[in-house]
Image (cartoon, rainbow, N blue to C red):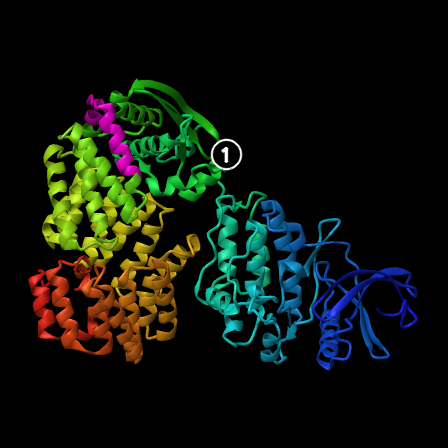
Amino acid sequence: MPPDQIADRYKILEKLGEGGIGVVYRARDERLDRDVALKVLSAASANDPEARERLLHEARTASRLNHPHICGVYDAGAMGDQIYVAMELVAGRSLKELSNGAPLPIASVIQYGDQVATGLAHAHEHGVIHHDLKSANVIISADGRAKIVDFGFAVRRTDEVSETTQSQLSLDRSGAIAGTLPYMSPELLKGQPADERSDIWALGVVLYELATGRQPFQGITTFELSSVILCGVPEAFPPTVPPGLRTIIHRCLAKESGERFQSAAEVAKALKSLDADGMDSARRPATRGKGKSGRIRSIAVLPLHNLSPDPEQEYFADGMTEALITELARIRALKVISRTSTMQYKSVKMRMDLIAQELGVDGVIEGSVIRAGDRVRITAQLVHAATDKHIWAESYDRELSEVLSLQSEVARTIAEQIRVKLTAGEREHFKRPRKVMAEVYECYLKGRFHFNKWTVEAVKKGIEHFQQALQLDPDYAPAYAGIADCYNALQFLGLPSSEVGPKALKAAVRAVALDPTLAAAHAALGSVKFFHDWDWAGAEREFQRAIELDPGSADAHQGYAYLLTALGRHEKAIAEIERAHELDPMALSENVNLGWRYYFARDFDKAILRLRETLELDSNFGNAFWCMGLCYVQKKNFAEGILYLKRAVMLYSGNPQPKGSLGHAYGLAGKNAKAQKIVDELVALAKTLYVSAWAVAIIYIGMGDKNRAMEWLEKAYQDRNASLVWLKVNPEFDPIRSDTRFEDLLQRMNLVE
């Protein structure tokens, strides 16, 4: 405990807090008759020369700064062995205390972020880098003013950084993080010097923390958290964080400092461009009345609310939502957002204009559905997002057997209300009376519900429901298309293509025969012809027919993009996948598949850029880590590539294909022992589970063992492994392209022009 009086000037009044090396007191400056915050060394640090120097360093550094958003330093000195610093007394709470694990209002996040960025800009202009910015080091005064405090780790541009950086890693004996590692930028963790952009990274962490109530990077141990900061991406934002603010935070948190804002002033300017809702005020849709600006040419159907008291009926509400999307997507003149994107707004309370901006649409359809026995009631309304004007609303009460005609009626009415011109074929489709047995449709919806979960168990359950539908109506084409989709999915979920491919083909052919106008049937048949039959021309015909019948099908555009990539038609493939992404903007699969298209086209930098965008949406999306790792491997950055591939292997947990790519990378990096270990693991695993021969082949390619590589590729060919469709374009096969056996394999697969 210090004496009641320090330096015959400061009278200690009360203890305010303690942390690190110092204790802070409220004290009375009797010379100038004002209260100050007096920081002195703690008892444990009083005799530590390094601690004494750090406190004086803080005083010297902060005294150079004079800004309304930086805590000012008035005086510093010594009384005997005790060092003290007199600072501006800021009455308030830290951002960490204000947030307390919960998100702040968006307007407050923007306000405080702008103030902190402005304060940082002043510090940077005077050659001072804070080096320890965090939510605990920003105090909000009673009048709502942010003050940056604690420049104890601050460095000037001429200072030596390495020791300062090292001193921030404060750990307890268990290895748990106890210091400020969560706010440290990747370059600091790599031992590189700090500059202004390291503070901008820390500001991004603070903004994320305030907007979401949690930190962007999570880890229990130092190693785990450091790895996530270096290679991971922030946890996905909740829908309540608007797009404009997300963009600013993501740019602050770019891994490469050159991709961040280059000055704190730029961050402040970007934050000032947002309105109180976090939207870019320059891009907010104008609120206008009638006129051309009010036209609706793009729509999103939000998940219909299930008003049934039975939660088990949730599948029915989801199925009706998907069916309405499918009906509207048939209208060529209307852009309709796909199911995957719109389902993310299920049970989310968010303003219509914000949802519309995220999805890039003019209009939003919302409503509810309730099923009572064999009757169904749907209520729907169409809202023009920019003006919040209700264009149309209606309720429908029908027998469940008439639900298909009901869906067409709703789609046709919406088209009439927004004055979209229908083609003759579209008008004919919507007028055609269609009925289905209630029990059949119920089984079909349950099948789609389980298929969309995309796990082996769920997809197999989906097949069971589709088969039940066919037992009731053997000629129900959508159920056959659903079965084909399921078997197509299973070959990517770990089952042998030679086992599931023929079953998918049989179901898809039957679906097309029963209903040649069913787009989903043609898309399913296209996938079978592509991945299993290796019938490139036949696959192209089916995908093109599917798109002709349903131009709004993101799945059909995606499948066609796959085919075009495999054939080396990269420019058109990228155009198709971008169209799929436009129709399904929030779907992770469309984001990551665009990255894969660039990877196969050997534009690795563009692929990495797109994949980072994917990981911004989901920091645990294994497919993105897989492709990112491959890109770095092709750029000869083996260390970075291996880090990403390790993460992919962990996230895929059980799928041997990413493990094969990791082994391939080890081989190219000259780590053959590690590569061979993965081969041994896969061969052992193959005794109990199906293991793709392709995965073993690419490891041997990386190790330079062409004979064994070709031996395993031949096995993959006999298994009709779906991954072989990429033989012509996959850079992993480059080391053996000149081998005559590989050329023969390409010939047998009709991949040689």
* x and y, in percent, of residue 95 in the image: 66, 54
Q: Quadrant of residue 207?
A: bottom right
Mark 1 lies on a secondary structure that is loop
Q: Which residue is mark 1?
A: 287
- On screen, residue 499 versus residue 492, left or right, reads left
- On screen, residue 444 versus residue 62, left or right, reads left
Q: Nearer the viewer, residue 133 or 44?
A: 44
Q: Is residue 722 magenta?
A: no
Which quadrant, please, contains the N terminus? bottom right
Decide: is 365 above or below 275: above
Q: Amino acid at mark 1?
A: Thr
Q: Which residues are magenta?
A: 427-449
Mark 1 packing: few (<14 Cα in 10 Å), some, or many (20+)? few
Residue at the image point whose x is 19% and y is 69% from the top: 697
Residue at the image point whose x is 25% and y is 40% from the top: 462
Residue at the image point whose x is 28% and y is 59% from the top: 655
Decide: is 240 above or below 699: above
Q: Main secondary structure of the magenta part?
A: helix
* x and y, in percent, of residue 303 in the image: 39, 34
Decide: is 745 above or below 622: below
Q: Quadrant of residue 740?
A: bottom left
Q: Nearer the viewer, residue 329 or 293?
A: 329
* x and y, in percent, of residue 51 in the image: 72, 77
On the question of residue 348 being in view, the answer is yes
Which quadrant, please, contains the C terminus? bottom left
On the question of residue 333 being in view, the answer is no
